[in-house]
Image (spheres, rainbow, N blue to C red):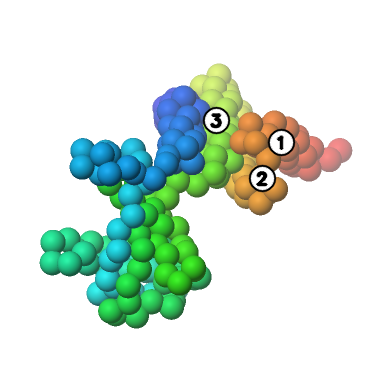
Amino acid sequence: MLILLSLASAVACCLVFAWWLPSDGERYQDYRAAESCSSGELSRSDTDCLSTWHLTVEKTVNRTAGKESVHDATLTYRDSWRGTVHFNGSGPLLERLRPGDRVTATAWRGEIMVLTEDGVRQDTLEAPRDELQMNAAVGVLAGLVAAQCLVFGTVRLARPQAHEPLTWEPYGRRLLFSVIGVCFAVGLSAVWARVPWWTVPLVAVPLAMGAALWFRVRLRPRR
């Protein structure tokens, strides 16, 4: 079971670094490089440029209850279009909007990226973000989980009756939660510090290895 889990985690790690992270990075760069649509591009329905639309707010939902958060705005364009855009928070614009307000929407590739009203703007959840550090953190976490499961599984196969201390309690559990904490702490710190995504594995992997060694020393029987 642990060997299979290791293989699944290794595949997830490869997918993150080979597909998800490059795809998000390319999408962000394309969005940053996009220019306003010309009249010809609009007539051809070209979605790789930035188009501007003047929409009307029909209603907003701005609710946070426990773990559930809903931050939406339902918009209309004349009588021909009605849609809902989603945000990751209430501010700075969503909390100001009221039914009937007129807003300016910036669209790209068929999705609304930004809403603006009276100089106040807010990105929607569809807007690409330069946060590849968190993609890298997820990939590193998957790789470290794969390594842990492989080591624990191999030891269990080689020594079915004597695989101490590589057991779930207490070493495996402590190590897993430490790895999760390290990866996300490093990823969030990298986002905040605006450092390149490749610094995440350079920092997280040695820290995780240090945690593994520290727990191993702490749990070693004293003579």
* Location of residue 84 in the rendering, given as x and y in whole percent from the top left corner: 27, 63
Please name whichever residue, 11 or 201, is drawn nearer the observer in this view of the structure: 201
Q: Which residue is tagged 3? A: 143
Q: From the viewer's perspective, is residue 164 above or below residue 39? A: above
**Amino acid at pointer 3:** Gly
The label on residue 203 is 1
Q: From mark 3 to mark 1, how far is it between C-alphas?
A: 14 Å
**Amino acid at pointer 2:** Arg
* Location of residue 159 in the rendering, given as x and y in whole percent from the top left corner: 57, 22
Q: Is residue 185 left or right of residue 26?
A: right
Sequence-wise, the earlier of marks 3 and 1 is 3
* Location of residue 44 in the rendering, given as x and y in whole percent from the top left corner: 21, 38
**In the rendered image, is residue 28 in sight?**
no
Residue furthest to the front in view is 39
Sequence-wise, the earlier of marks 2 and 3 is 3
Is label 2 in a helix, a strand or a loop?
Answer: loop
Foreground mark, 3 or 1, reads 1
Please tell me in which quadrant of the rendered image residue 97 appears.
bottom left
**In the rendered image, is residue 96 in sight?**
yes
Quadrant (top left, top right, bottom left, bottom right) of the C terminus: top right
Q: Do the residues labelled 2 and 3 touch (CB within 8 Å)?
A: no
Foreground mark, 1 or 2, reads 2
Q: Which residue is drawn at 30% across and 64% down?
A: 54
Residue furthest to the left in view is 79
